[in-house]
Amino acid sequence: MALLEENKGSPGADEGETDSITKACILDGFTEVADTRDLICSLPQVHGDMRPREVTTQKFKLILDRYQDQPHLLDPHLGSLFSLLLEFVRNEKSELSLVHLSFQFLYFISKVRGFKRAMHRFPHEVADVLPVLNLLSQQDPKDCKTWETRYMLLLWLSMTCLNPFDFSRLDGILESGVGKPREPTMDRIMDIAKVFEKSCIFMTRPDVKQMCLGDFLDWSLTTISQTSDDSVTNVRVLDGVLQSLVIVCVCVCVSVAVCVCVRSSELLRKLIVKLSQRLGLTFLKPRLADWRYQRGSRSLAANLAMTKSAAPVTPEETPQEQEEYYDIPEEVESVIDHLLMGLRDKETIVRWSAAKGIGRLTGRLPKVLANEVVGAVLECFSFHETENAWHGGCLALAELGRRGLLMPSRLTEVVPLILKSLIYDKKRGTHSVGANVRDAACYVCWSFARAYEPKELKPYVNQIASSLLITAVFDRSINCRRAASGTFPHGIGIVTTADYYAVGNLSNCYLKISVYIAAFPEYTQAMIDHLVDMKINHWDGVIRELATKALHNLTPQAPDYMATTVLPKLLTMAVGPDLQRRHGAILACGEVTYALYKEGRKEVVDLISPECVDALKSIHQKVGTIELMRLAICGLIEKLSLSKMPFKNDPVISGWQWILDNTIETLHLVSSKARDDILSAVVSALMALCEEYYQTETGQADAETQDVLVSRYINGLQSAQLLVRCGSALALGCLPAFMIHGKVEQVYMKGMCVVTQKDRTFSEARRDAIKSIAQVFVKAGVCANGTPDSCLCSENVNKVYELLLNSMSDYTTDSRGDIGAWVREAAMSSLRDLTLLISSSAPEVLTPDLVKCMMACLAQQAAEKIDRYRAHAGNIFVHLLHSTEPAVPHIPHREELLIIFPVETTTSLDWKAPSHAFQYITQLLGLPEYQYHTLLGLTVSVGGITESTVQFSSQSLFKFLRKIPDNAALEQFEEVLLKVFRDHLHNDRCYESFVLYDAAVKSNKSLCSCSHPFCMEILNLCKQCKKTKDPAKLRCCISVFCGLIQFQGDVRKKVWSQLLLLLCHSGCAIRQMAADQMYEMLVTYDDVVNPEVLGEIIELLSNTNWQSDLNTLRPLRNQICDWLEVPQPQLISKVYISFSFFTQ
């Protein structure tokens, strides 16, 4: 076996750590053949003992399973392996358990190599028939433990049945040794076949047909009629019987064969259909119809030898007299009716089998009767038929066309039905059906292209090509798009663009491939009409939106057609009763209008009629409050504003503004799924509306409109509704620069009030307010000497940065988790945008303290546990560090940072992968300006609950600590760690992470040189928190105490005192937790206790029920105190002082 490995190194890894290893196993041969033979030879010794038997079986199975992908490697050794195993079977002295085990090993081989290959390795001489038959007769069909034996014996018996000799020769004198008659071999095999419901190969023998066919058919029909329910056992019985009948397929009464009632099992229905068609074929002469349509020859050599002048023989050229007439039995009609019913079955495998049966039977019928069959198939395409009938009809037409049984004269009827099938789509509740119909219609087109001469299809080529291209580009199902992509007129150019892989992406099909194909004039109008008629009103909202964008992209191909035909049609649909059609039509109106404007040849009002202009202005009056319509009208407002429609000072503008404001005020009434989309549409529409219609000729804002809008949205920031606050904040952020000129300070102050309001219910509002503040200052610009009311200047930059930096400490949580992360993410993005803006315009505004705090906070976020926000912070950190145009000034330790984060890390470093990120971020601990914040973030990661984050952050931290050069640096690190611990001692979010972090640090043996003052300080801080009743905090305290036990002196004594106090804590769960962790600690650190008493302490901790009564536990706890030479805790009695004492 050759083992190939491909290693991909981690970018920037200092020790060449492997990022990923891709292994591929390629087997050169059956290398374990010797081991396999040894296992087989050991079967006589292990078959009687259960354990060695199972070990040998598992080893044998494990070896063979390796060759599942390359089973052909076993072929040279199959004969020898079979011979070894069959020796045990043939040996009369072999025990029954050895025989069963041998057959089990044979089954393992056949499972890997396949039963068809394996069964040919069985000996099939005449002498093997009776021994195999006798052994199979002795088996119990209901024994589940020996099913492999019966399976392999059936395969062996089927091989012996292929020998060309009469079984009657094996019977000899049909008397047993005691004078009783002996059953013939043929009857014995038939009885076995009936028991196991497998008689396919046996019934094909001529001598068996002659002797047993009648009895077998009687038994088969009786079994079918008596099997009423669809239990697993009955389905298995029917499966075997029907498969045998399909293989035998003799002239039986069809009415009896097809009278089997419709079963719920699709496998049985398929077999019934297959049996019916085989029976029907027995009534017809095996011939190829002379009247069929023939294209070329079946021989490639004959086709190449044909000259261009040799025209194919068509049915019209065949004389009527040449067709042979003969009587068709009535039973054939029953078979065809049964097959036509199969075309309407609910299962695909049944319809497919029925379609092939119709093709086979039609090929043996006279032309007139075959034409009637084609007419019956075309009835499947009726409007009242289900999608199953349409699918079955397409499959049948494909089979008829492929076999040349569908005459060219029928194409005038068939092609329109196929074109309808290519766009068949029926809505069923919240989904649609018809993808299988469209896929089958593509198969019909494929079969027609290969069945008919070009001149026959020439009148229909353009229609079929257009429909196939539309399906290939605009179908919702990826399977249909790929099935329709093929050869068309202009085929080379189209196929290379709309190939199998390109059509896999739905957006790519609608927005890019469609534009390329529409450049061919014969397809342009058909594609546009399909989008307007079929996709604008599609039940899937994604398809409707893509259709409108596709119409936008196709407008340059036919602008006049769009303006004069499509747009009026869309405006009519926009006020119709169908909600989905109205939604798509309104969006399409906006997209088409904007596309006409971008053409730039004329003004939009010059391209469209005045009636269309009036209709566009009045659409918003008929929208209502339905959220789908609000989404559409916001898109229309945006596109019409971008199209610079001449509506300035028109009352329609007030109507549009009212719709946008009302949508913001009623966002809380909208479903949660549509809120984000509607809010985004409102913001985009408002920005476009203000840019176009609220600006005077001098470039200033209309004063009245400015005051009204800014005041309205500022008041919205104080709303009691969360979504109103979000909408108002985003609306303020999207206002153009001229709309906020002179209002910057007002917007900032109100936005700051929202951000600083630490309410759990308004995290989304704080996030959007931070985005809004950054957008306002980006649009207002930076001027060092400017005024706070007009721009970002030296007077307000500190306040703005302080607000954003404080927002990076928002760790609000609720039932959804850490929702404060939304605020932190928005603050990081805002800091990046403002910092780059200031650095490019007025870098003197940035002070070293601001940049230091910003980079330190980013480092903290880049060291925390949530992958998404760690990646966001890390990317911003590296981006600001390597930014050159503009360069960010005053970054602390820039040179050291450039060494840690070289320029390659801007693209290669995967911040979401803990294995990559933490090996970089821990290096910031060596830089004093970043040490505190980085350690704070790492503390949360090391003390987290995600296994990968804890693992890699701990490894990177310990690796850094081992590289600390001297004790002074280590003491300085300890001081920072204590400061972090003190500052966040009562922070519920951080406390558990801190103590787990400290426990991990103290449990690392390489750090046992820490000074005692540091340990005492940690101990004292934990003692302060030990008074809490929170089980999580107490659990963490116990972990820290157990980690500190390894330090000698006063630290150890005080730790023992605290742990022993917890053994009699008022909470029973805390007592048990303390005992368990003390037990684990003593097992780990066996040198912290006198060895003479270590065993007794461990035994007492493990055997005592620490959740029992305290009066029982205190003496046991005190016994441990005596063993450890620690003072016993004293119970302090409470003193009650009467109130009258103070009054005296």
Image (cartoon, helix red, strand yellow):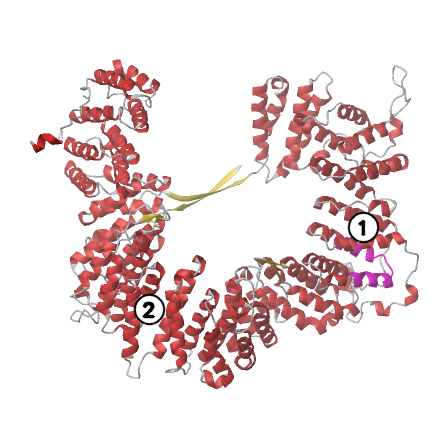
Residue 431 in view in this figure: yes
Instruction: Find the residue positioned furthest to the left.
Output: 1144
Front in this rendered view, residue 154 or 619:
619
Q: Is residue 652 above or below residue 858?
A: below
Please tell me the numbered disc located at residue 734. 2
Q: Is residue 147 above or below residue 863?
A: above
Magenta span covers which residues? 355-376
Q: Is residue 254 left or right of residue 693?
A: right
Q: Secondary structure at mark 2?
A: helix
Question: Which amino acid is tagged 2?
Answer: Cys
How would you classify the magenta stretch by its main secondary structure?
Answer: helix
Seen at 41% across and 73% down, the residue is: 638
Seen at 51% across and 76% down, the residue is: 555
Mark 1 is surrounded, within 10 Å at the Cα level, by few (under 14), some (14 to 19) or many (20 or more) other residues, namely: many
Question: Which amino acid is tagged 1?
Answer: Gln
Instruction: Find the residue positioned furthest to the top.
Output: 1092
Q: Secondary structure at mark 1?
A: helix
Q: Earlier in the sequence, mark 1 or mark 2?
A: 1
Please tell me the numbered disc located at residue 277. 1
Q: Is residue 100 left or right of residue 956?
A: right
Q: Position of residue 965 (x, y in %)?
A: 19, 38
Looking at the rendering, which quadrant does residue 364 occupy? bottom right
Which quarter of the rendered picture does the C terminus lie within?
top left
Q: Position of residue 903 (x, y in %)?
A: 30, 56
Q: Is residue 769 left or right of residue 292?
A: left
